[in-house]
Amino acid sequence: MSADLLPIAIPTGQRPAPIAELFYSFQGEGVNLGRRALFVRFLGCNLTCGYTDAPTSRHSPAQGSMLCDTEYTWNSAKHDLSAGARHLTPQAIWDELIQLDPTTADPTLPPIDLIVITGGEPLLHKDAVLHLAHQARLADRHVEIETNATIKPGPDLVAAGVAFNAGLKLASSAVPRKKRIKPDAIRQLEASGRARWKFVVSTVDDLAEVATLQAEFGLTEIWLSPEGTTPERVMEHMRMAAAPALQHGWNLTTREHVLIWGGQRAR
Ligand SMILES: Nc1nc2[nH]cc(C(=O)O)c2c(=O)[nH]1
Ligand code: SF4
Ligand SMILES: [Mg+2]
């Protein structure tokens, strides 16, 4: 980890935050694809991908083709959010992560140097995320935050040295543009120099919108990610996106956990 970062001040805020799951897997997407990682998944999201508004019943039909693959973190009309969820202080989250790390039980194993913080939208729980980022830095582990890029990360989190997998949502999510495109947040993330822009794609219309957003906001590092919770859909959308990605100078990730485990939770 680079030594040019600001000094660390561990915040004292230890308000409990809602956790959907903690798990150990491979980072299934992006620049660290295939690396072993410890995952923190927070509950709650400020968007409703697949729906224009928060669904009111379990039968509310989806309006978008891009569906959220973790509806169990926010869609209370369809899921009992309290089932299996826990409220943990940021330090308790960190302590459990360390217990999940197989290196803790067997120090002969190579250490896990990556922590992935996801949701839902993890930046709704910024104090907890900041605490985890500081602890990770002290332990010389990298942090990637999977965010929907609608919330400004703030200078503290940027100074903590985390990377942002900034998953801007497209029209195919059915979320109104005003809610999913927040120019100030996008600019702050881009200016941090630590944002990789991730777009979940399944159609050529999605690709055209990626090009428009890239030009509008001057996004530098773009990753396409194939929509889907089955290996077949992931492969179909990778094949659709491959040639345009090469042509535009975009990277293309797979979703390794879907190829291996389909849509299973905590994988
Ligand atoms: N293995 C694995 N890698 C992931 N990368 C980002 C994930 C996410 O849900 O944000 C994810 C996930 O759910 N599983
Ligand atoms: S931003 Fe992510 S977690 Fe939130 S609804 Fe959209 S896909 Fe789901
Ligand atoms: Mg996922």
Image (tube, rainbow, N blue to C red):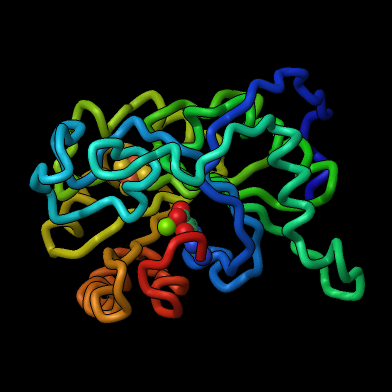
Where residue 26 appears, as percent x and y from the top left, is 58, 69
| Residue 81 placement, left or right of 32 | left
Q: Is residue 123 left or right of residue 66?
A: right
Q: Give coordinates of residue 230: x percent, y percent.
A: 30, 74
For residue 25, above or below residue 15:
below
* Closer to the camera in the image, 120 or 81: 81
Q: Is residue 205 above or below residue 263?
A: above
Quadrant location of residue 14? top right
Q: Does the rendering let one see residue 63?
A: no
> In the image, is residue 56 above or below residue 80?
above
| Number of marks drawn | 0
- Side of 69 relative to 178 (left or right): right
Residue name at image x 18 percent, y 37 percent: 175
User: Which image quarter: residue 36?
Assistant: bottom right
What residue lies at 71% left-to-right and 31% top-to-bottom?
A: 131
Query: Where residue 107 appears, x then y in whole percent?
Result: 91, 69
Q: Quadrant of ligand 2?
A: top left
Residue visible at 64% across and 33% down in the picture: 88
Q: Report x, y in % for residue 30.
A: 48, 63
Closest to the observer, 124 or 76:
76
Please say whether residue 261 is visible from this viewpoint. Answer: yes
Residue drawn at the location 36% of the way across and 67% of the way down: 263
Most distant residue in the right direction: 107
